Image (tube, helix red, strand yellow):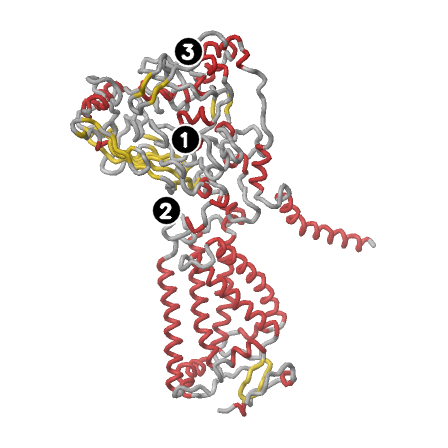
Amino acid sequence: MTSNNMVNIYLYTRYERFWHWMQTVLILLLLVTGFELNGLFTLFGFKAAAEVHNIAGLTWLILFAFFVFWLFTTGEWRQYVPTTRKMLSVIRYYTYGIFRGEPHPVPKRKDAKHNPLQRLVYLSLAAALLPVQMATGFLYWGYNSWKDWGVGWLSLELVATIHLAGAFAILSFLIVHIYMITTGHTVFAHTRAMISGWELVQEGTQIEDWEQKKRRAPRPVA
Amino acid sequence: MEGCNRMWRSAAVLLGALLLPAWGLSQTQVLDENQAPGRTMAQQATKGPQIWITADHSLHPVLQKTFSSGPEVTQACLSCHELAAGQFQKTIHWSWLDPNVDPKMKVGKGGLTMNNFCINLQSNEPRCTSCHAGYGWKDKNFDFSNPHAVDCLVCHEQTGTYEKFPTAAGFTVDEPTLFKENGKIFEPPAWNTVAQSVSRPTRKNCGTCHFFGGGGDGVKHGDLDSSLMKPNKELDVHMGVDGQNFDCVRCHTTELHSIAGRIYSTPAAMERKSLIEDDLAPKIMCESCHSRTPHKPGVKANDHTDKVACQSCHIPTFARVNPTKMWWDWSKAGQKKDGQPYKEEDAFGKPKYDSKKGEFRWAKNVVPEYFWFNGSLNGLTAKDTIDPSKTVAVSWPVGDRDDANSRIFPFKVHRGKTPYDKINKTMVIPHLFGKPGSGAYWADYDWKKAAASGMAYAGLPFSGEMDFVETSYVFPITHMVAPKNKALACSECHAKNGRLAHLTGFYMPGRDVNRVIQYLGWTVVFGSLAGVFIHGLGRFIARGGKER
């Protein structure tokens, strides 16, 4: 396959890119400070780590509200609806086809950015893992107010343990995620797309009219 | 028009509701934005010198007559302060018994309550009662109702020359007398000078006994020793002569000779009230002047005050200037060199061996041990049954995590070995101080005779079989509050092997972790790493080492 049959499409809007990289920063901060608080290493010192963790967590919580707003006002939530269609072929691709240089069975399009596997993973993240992590984090942060909030019966150990389990799940996601973004047509193709918004996809993919607009198109690939 | 008005009114209400919390917050910061409100409050409470005295005792004719003894001075004092002796005799400073327990129980150091220092007063009175604010408590026949036996001077005189002889049951000497134990010569007081110098008690008055409890500097309390006579702020922010220069009674609020402070199982205060809530409350708690949330708004330490005592973080170590005694092994007493009792000193110049008393260990800059504490200490009496198979707690803090009045509190734990009755399973009161032939250990060096004599004196059974058991005794650490920049860092406790490693029953971030989740979590994380590594390697090999 050569670059001749690739076309540039505008895949990620400015807000999506902001949200993605903002989350990157927050997740890294939270993981580092969180594992420091957990006792894994000393970097910021416990007090600073706790303060950074609290601020990053609350920031994320607030930004997440904007994300949910965006998700529903733009209809983007449809991209997270799980499906089993083509699921098997995606799994087959990553376990077999990718080693043979086969094309991806579900190429990215503006209105279908996620393949069935991604839909499932991102839905689990956005609808389950992250909310659970935020809820337990918020409770952890508000520990001294539990009685006032009427949740004095809660166990800090339970909340902390769920929060830790979530942290491991996110760290594990991060590892796989960072690896998966190297599986584009070049190692940094997906990363570049998340920075500029534009991604090269296989020709023949249905492309909307508006995507043809020459806005900040990157250099044509040689 | 009507509808428009209503709309604006609703908008104003909404705006008000939004701004109200911000306004409330600004109220707590109004005193001084640059420092914690708890400090500002305490500074307000202590500002301005208080000169209340309207009498000059040196002008009183009654204090200019000739005195030949302490009780005569007391009589002169009482000729104006008629109620003073009666007030004083109701307090623990006089009775040495817990006033909140039936006197028949004999709870208190004047009764049967034990310690692991010189163990008990019974049969040893003349030595112990050199620290009694009275004259003549030489045995159990002492008349506690005699007003003239009250010693006003030891607490009130300000010359610093008034000294009770160490073995004279609270009396001074009539002529210069050598105290052989330390080679010091005690002088008879210049009665008129001493009597005319009286004022409110200062650190020196209280420290004369409380800094030397147990028979020497820093023997008992780890946070009270002679370094507090003239401390700097570094040692004690409140008492520092370069700072607030507090006397003891600045916090130990005194009413009618009753001095605020913990008395055995009775906490120093039942409620943690600030002066804002009750301006006549005793100033004995940190909260009295500093409030319950003394740190700047939003500081996490304010959230800790419901479970962690101020002292736990603000007294990083005790005995920071002078060493304090941490270990006293009575079982080693009685060794002799060339048939003679002897003493040895340690690196601090403190006794590490004394044939009379056994082996000692001293320490400086001691990290406290932490326990739940509601302000109440319980202790053993000589009647209580013990379990000698393990360390016997002679005194212990009362408290529990689920008790709203309990806090995690720092303690000095003094450990040692003390004698007990092997058959009756009780601690033993040895007769220590006395003349040769009296059975006193310090004269005859015979434990069985000393135990039999002491227990008989106390009216308690002794089987004749005794041995030594390891014991512990606790002192709450509350003085020697360090400057705020010396307060403990979070990680002193929020760590795997931190200061609170042994306190169980609650989850503490940084210390506790669910092992199963920890193990599973790292398995998943390393599994993911291995997975992507193998997958990536597969891609690399399958493509012959080149990506498109």
Determine crowd level at label 3: few under 14, some 14-19, many 20+ residues with C-alpha closer than 10 A. many
Q: Chain of mark 1?
A: B
Between circles 2 and 3, the one closer to the viewer is 3
- The residue that disc 3 covers is B71
Q: Residue at x 61, y 75 (%)?
A: A13
Residue B326 drawn at (x, y percent): 32, 37
Q: Residue at x 42, y 86 (%)?
A: A97
Determine crowd level at label 1: few under 14, some 14-19, many 20+ residues with C-alpha closer than 10 A. many
Q: Residue at x 31, y 19 (%)?
A: B178
Between circles 3 and 1, the one closer to the viewer is 1
Instruction: Find numbered disc 3 in the image and state the secondary structure of the residue it sits on.
Output: helix
- The residue that disc 2 covers is B504
- The residue that disc 1 covers is B226
The amino acid type of the residue labelled 3 equals Pro
The amino acid type of the residue labelled 2 equals Thr
Give above or below for B47 relative to B365.
above
Residue that lies at the very extreme toward the right in this rendered image: B1
Residue B41 drawn at (x, y percent): 58, 37
Disc 2 from disc 3: Cα separation = 54 Å
Dots 1, 2 in contact, CB < 8 A:
no
Which residue occupies the foreground of this view, B127 or A163? Answer: B127
The amino acid type of the residue labelled 1 equals Ser
Disc 1 from disc 2: Cα separation = 36 Å
Disc 3 from disc 1: Cα separation = 28 Å
Q: Which mark is residue B509?
A: none
- Give left or right: position of A144 versus B135: right
Give above or below for B346 relative to B300.
above
